[in-house]
Amino acid sequence: MLGRRNVLTAFVAATVTALLMQANAAEEKSITVFAAASLKNALDEVDGLFTKQSGIKVVASYAASSSLMKQIEQGASADVFLSADIDWMDYGIKHNLIKNDTRENLLGNRLVLIAPKDSKNGGVTIALGFDLAALAGSGRIATGDVRAVPAALVSVTASLL
């Protein structure tokens, strides 16, 4: 399992690579990036490093991947799209809103269950059909709103527009 620093390093390297690909074609001294809101902290750090190295300013717009793709579909201008939802990247490709040959799958994750240290429910394997409500019993469960956040699986993909 990768540590937080290793994941951030991989993310920074992949994102800078995507930005550099776009920068090579850019005539202006700025790049507009539409990125999933969940990437804000990491991407703000990447943006600063990229600007320092290249002299090219990154203008980032953060929101839900679905909202950003709908803005692109309505004509919003962006150079790079970083999605936390593969389905919205696929939507962009299907509707010719992004350049398919620039798509890169950068990161992924997995759903984990966190319980108090003294919990008697250790060693649980989450799989299709898993009855989480039964496991929680009268306890509480907290998760993202699955209508807005792909909580079961988040994979960050990037593409040029």
Image (tube, rainbow, N blue to C red):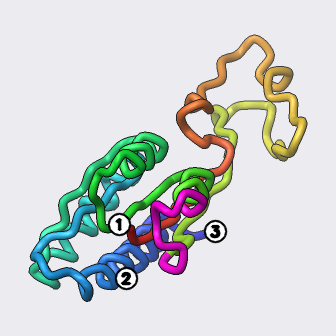
Q: Which three-letter amino acid code belongs to the residue tagged 1? A: Val
Quadrant in which the C terminus appears: bottom left
Which residue is disc 2 drawn over?
A: 17
Q: Which three-letter amino acid code belongs to the residue tagged 2? A: Thr
Which residue is disc 1 drawn over?
A: 80
Whether 16 is drawn above or below 66: the answer is: below
**Foreground disc of the pair 2, 1:** 1
Which region shows up in magenta?
93-102
Whether 132 is drawn above or below 58: the answer is: above
Q: CA distance from mark 3 to mark 1?
A: 29 Å
**Foreground disc of the pair 2, 3:** 2
Q: What percent of the width, then of the height, locates residue 7?
A: 48, 69
Q: Is residue 22 left or right of residue 153?
A: left
Q: Which numbered disc, 2 or 1, marks the residue that appears first in the sequence?
A: 2
Q: Are marks 3 and 1 in contact (CB under 8 Å)?
A: no
**Residue at image point 30% right, 79% down:** 22
Q: CA distance from mark 2 to mark 1?
A: 11 Å
Q: Quadrant of residue 129?
A: top right
Residue ranking furthest to the right:
129
Quadrant in which the N terminus appears: bottom right
Q: What percent of the width, then of the height, locates residue 140?
A: 65, 18
Q: Which three-letter amino acid code belongs to the residue tagged 3? A: Met
Q: What percent of the width, then of the height, locates residue 149?
A: 55, 38
Q: Which numbered disc, 3 or 1, marks the residue that appears first in the sequence?
A: 3
Q: Is residue 147 left or right of residue 53?
A: right
Which residue is disc 3 drawn over?
A: 1
Q: Which numbered disc, 2 or 3, marks the residue that appears first in the sequence?
A: 3
How many labels, in total? 3
